[in-house]
Amino acid sequence: MLRKLYPKLYLGSIFELDLEALKKEGIKGLIFDIDNTLVPYDVAEPTKEIIELFNTLRNETFKICLMSNNVEDRVMRFNQNLKVFAIHKSGKPRIKSFKRALELMDLSKEEVAIVGDQIFTDVYGGNRMGVKTILVQPVSDKDEWMTKIKRGLEQRVIKLYEKHGK
Ligand SMILES: [Mg+2]
C-alpha cells in the first residue's frame, strides 16, 4: 500500500524536470496537475516561465495534458493560451481520467509521466495507472482547506519515502 504512495521522483519544482533523462526513459507525454504544481490555486493564468517551459516541452516534442480536479472554468481559463490537452474535474486518484489523458495524447502508460504536488491524488492515482510519478514541492503554502488537512499526512509519507522508498 505504502509503495503506491511513493513517487518515482521527487523534485523541488517543475523547472527541475530533466527532459533529456525523461526522453531516454521513453517518456513522450507529461500530465500536469495545475493547482500548486504550476501555480498557486488562486492564480488564474500561467506565468511567463510556465509558458516558456511548455514551449520548450513542445519543441522537444513532448505531448502535454493538464489534469485537474478543479472545475471547468478554472482549467479552461488556465489553458486559454497554452492550448494543450486538458481534463477538468478529473477525479484523481481514480484512474478514469488517466486513461482519458493517455487516449488524448495517444500514448501508452509506459510513455507518460504525471507531475503533481499531491501524494493522495497525483502520485497515488499515477501509480495505480502505472505511469511514472513525479512529485514536486507545492509552489505555495496556501492550500484549499481540504488539501490543508492532507498535508500533514503527506509529510509523513514523504519522510518514509526519503528513508525507505528511493
Ligand atoms: Mg495540486
Image: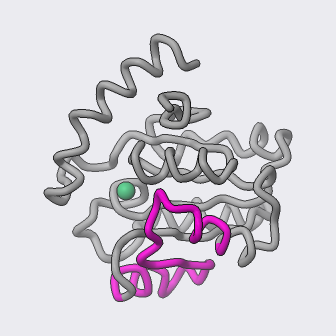
Residue shown at the point (18%, 48%) measured from the top left: 148
Residue shown at the point (41%, 80%) measured from the top left: 75
Residue 43, quarter of the rendered image: bottom left
The image shows a total of numbered marks equal to 0
Which colour assignment does the render follow?
one colour
> Percent from the top left, x then y, of residue 165?
54, 19
Residue shown at the point (19%, 56%) measured from the top left: 146
> Percent from the top left, x then y, of residue 3?
55, 29
Q: Quadrant of ligand 1?
A: bottom left
**In this orientation, which residue lies closer to the viewer: 75 or 2?**
2
Q: Which residue is outermost to the front?
A: 1
Magenta residue check for 123: no
Residue shown at the point (34%, 55%) measured from the top left: 36
| Quadrant showing the C terminus | top right
Q: Is residue 139 above or below residue 57?
A: above
> Percent from the top left, x then y, of residue 142?
18, 52
Q: Is residue 139 above or below residue 29?
A: above
Residue 54, quarter of the rendered image: bottom right
Magenta residue check for 81: yes
Q: Which residue is outermost to the left?
A: 145
Left or right: 111 in relation to 147? right
Q: Is residue 125 above or below residue 92?
A: above
Q: Which residue is outermost to the top?
A: 163
Q: Which residues are magenta?
A: 73-100
> Percent from the top left, x then y, of residue 149?
17, 46
